[in-house]
Every structure is written in structure tokens, then in C-alpha cells.
Amino acid sequence: MAVLLTFDYANFVANPTFAAYTNATLYPEATLQLYWDNAINYVSNVTTAGQLTEEGRRLAINLMVAHLVYISGLAASGQVPSLMQNATIDKVQIALTPPPLKNQWQWWLSVSPYGQQLFALLQANSVGGRYIGLNGTGLAGFGFVPGYNFNGN
């Protein structure tokens, strides 16, 4: 049975992982709710059997909320979340290093400590899996056909 998660401000600020966002003056509930609404575009707020537990999914979304708040803070302060290769003060020349990770998603999540935790959580919970094939269920995408020679003979 699917469960639809909603933003729980008390749960968010009670978690020591998000201690930087407990100041209600700087981060009021309504603002964090807006970030939650954005975060569920990246991490679904619907839990179903066989996926992350309800607590795990709530943690994943809360990590995405904190990640979005963090990178918004970088942007608001004029910081570009990237690695600087070199810079020149006179006549302003800046060279940025291309993202050193496999893909843009990984790089984007690596910009904040919350994104790094989220990436690790998602990786740990997306490894392997099952599929149904002609010869039964296989693990991690592998099924075996009895008597088949994988050398092509």
C-alpha cells in the first residue's frame, strides 16, 4: 500500500543532521515547505512496498530539502558551485574545472554535504534488484539459462 509523505517541520528541525536550518527566523516553516514541494520533484514522496522505508524516504526528501536550501544560499551570496582552476584579478579572467564526477547529477549532489549524503543513501538502496525472465527470477539483472554456453558454443 502506497503512503504519501507530507512535510513535517517538527521532524525536520528535530533531526540533528539539519541543525543548520533550525532557526525559525531564517528558515520559517513556510519557506522550508516550499523547498519540500520542490524536493519531491527529485525524490518521490510516495512510498511503496519494496522500496525505501517510510523513514528512509522521509530522510531522502529532507536531505534534498537541505541540499536545495544550501545551494540557494550559495547562489544568493554570489558563489558559483564549481571548482576554480585559476583566476586573474586584473581584467577578471576565471577558468572553472569541469565537473570531475561521472555525470551532472552526481556533481550537483556533491556541491553540498546533504547532497553527498543523499547520493550515498540512494546508491545504497538502488544496488541490485530483481527481474522476472523466462527462466525465473534473477538477481541484480542476471539470469541463467541452464545448459547455455556463454562462449557462444
Image: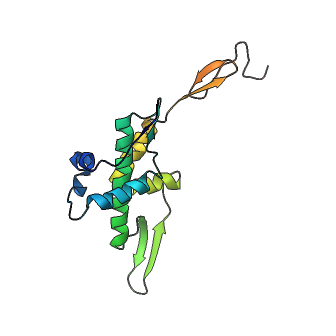
The answer to whether 142 is drawn above or below residue 78 in the figure is: above
Question: What's the colour scheme?
Answer: rainbow
Quadrant in the picture for residue 69: bottom left
In percent of the image, x 50 and y 53: which residue is there?
105
Which one is in front, 84 or 28?
A: 28
Instruction: For residue 112, say whether it is visible.
Output: no
Taking 59 as reference, is 100 left or right? right
- Identify the residue at the far right of this view: 153
In the image, what residue occupies the spot 42% across and 46% down? 119
Which percent across, then down, holds residue 127? 49, 33
Displayed quadrant of residue 74: bottom left
- Relative placement, left or right, of 7 versus 100 is left
Q: Which residue is drawn at 32% across and 72% down?
A: 77
How many numbered discs sit on the rendered protein?
0
Where in the figure is residue 121, as x and y percent of width and height? 40, 40
Residue 118 picture location, percent across and down: 39, 46
- Residue situated in front as seen by the camera: 146 or 91: 146
Residue in the foreground of this view, choosing between 16 and 78:
16
Q: Give the percent coordinates (x, y) of residue 104.
A: 51, 56
Q: Which of 111 and 53 is in front in this view?
A: 53
